[in-house]
Image (cartoon, rainbow, N blue to C red):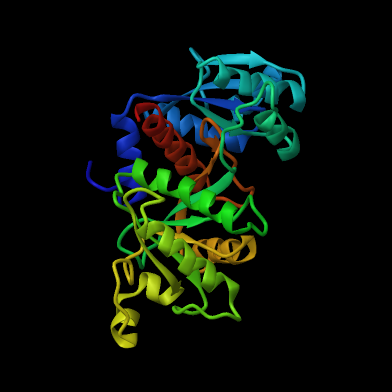
Amino acid sequence: MKPISSLSQLKQLARELPSQTVSVVRADEVETLSAVNEAVTGGMVDCVLVGPEDGIRAAAEEAGFDLNGVRIVPAKDDYESSYLGVDLIRKGEAGVLMKGLVATSAFLKAVLDKDHGIRGDGLLSHVAAFEVPSYPKLIIVTDAAMNIAPDFDQKTEILRNAITVARSLGIDPPKCTYVCAKEVPYDKMPCTLEAERMQKMAEAGEFGDILFQGPLALDLAVSMDSVRIKKVSGPVAGNADLMILPDIEAANILYKTLIFLAGGELGAVIMGAKNPVVLTSRADSAESKLCSLVLSGVVASYIGGR
């Protein structure tokens, strides 16, 4: 498969793959249903809508979403909606879970429930695939939304989750780096030492077939001009596919910089559960919400086909 290098190519891939069904929890929200409607009518996903039926029908009418043939699972509140939505995943009736008008705490409680959830063996983490006008391909950024101050072992899980997303996009082997403020290990900057350790793990094959170089400063991760000027070499320098950041603050700042200053659009997915989860931000554009749905469907197809 040729690597996906843009969000338009991502959408086309979703149209070509068998459609994944998205379980939408508390679908009684216009913004959520607008994105779902575009994805469904565009042939990129199918859906089941969970929540108060009257509210879903009213929101669908406002969103211009024709519910003819669309399955609705009635639920009265956040708790019931979340558990019924997760149960659809557990029964194999849906492959992707999406948060709608539901409190994040209730939603994640149902996802992580030990007896009735879809908790996986790994760590939940946020993976975003950005299209930025100044960069010639998609750039994957992690983790900007879930893990506040991950330790080293958690960062290796975050990297593994992001590698799965990269491979689902045909990026294989992905060029990965750990972005720090310096490109050499420095004992006063612990993240540079973690990056060095992560590179040794990658060289030992612990992440499978990937290319890893770290630490790298951001400019050396994505700019060939900086690579030439600073005379840095390596398999990833200037051409990264995937960037892991030291903590949620660094990742969130980069995430929002790419959107609000660099004009980026993105699709994002929560990895680490048994199935991909869509957990969009209120500030995300309609396009980013759509692409998050589509990305999650593509990842679900990849996981199911392994």
The N terminus - image quarter: top left
The answer to whether 151 is drawn above or below residue 172 in the figure is: below
Q: Residue at x 67, y 27 (%)?
A: 26
Give the residue drawn at x 57%, y 50%: 284
Q: Residue at x 36, y 48 (%)?
A: 208
Residue 136 shown left or right of residue 157 in the figure? left
**Which quadrant of the figure has residue 116?**
top right
87 is higher (above) or lower (below) than 295: above
Q: Is residue 261 left or right of residue 221?
A: right
Q: Position of residue 201 (x, y in %)?
A: 43, 58
On the image, which quarter does residue 242 sit in? bottom left
Q: Residue furthest left?
A: 2
The reply to whether residue 57 is visible in this rendering is no
Image quarter hosting the C terminus: top left
Q: Position of residue 48 (x, y in %)?
A: 54, 20
Q: Is residue 161 above or below residue 141?
A: above
x and y percent of residue 101 in the render? Answer: 69, 34
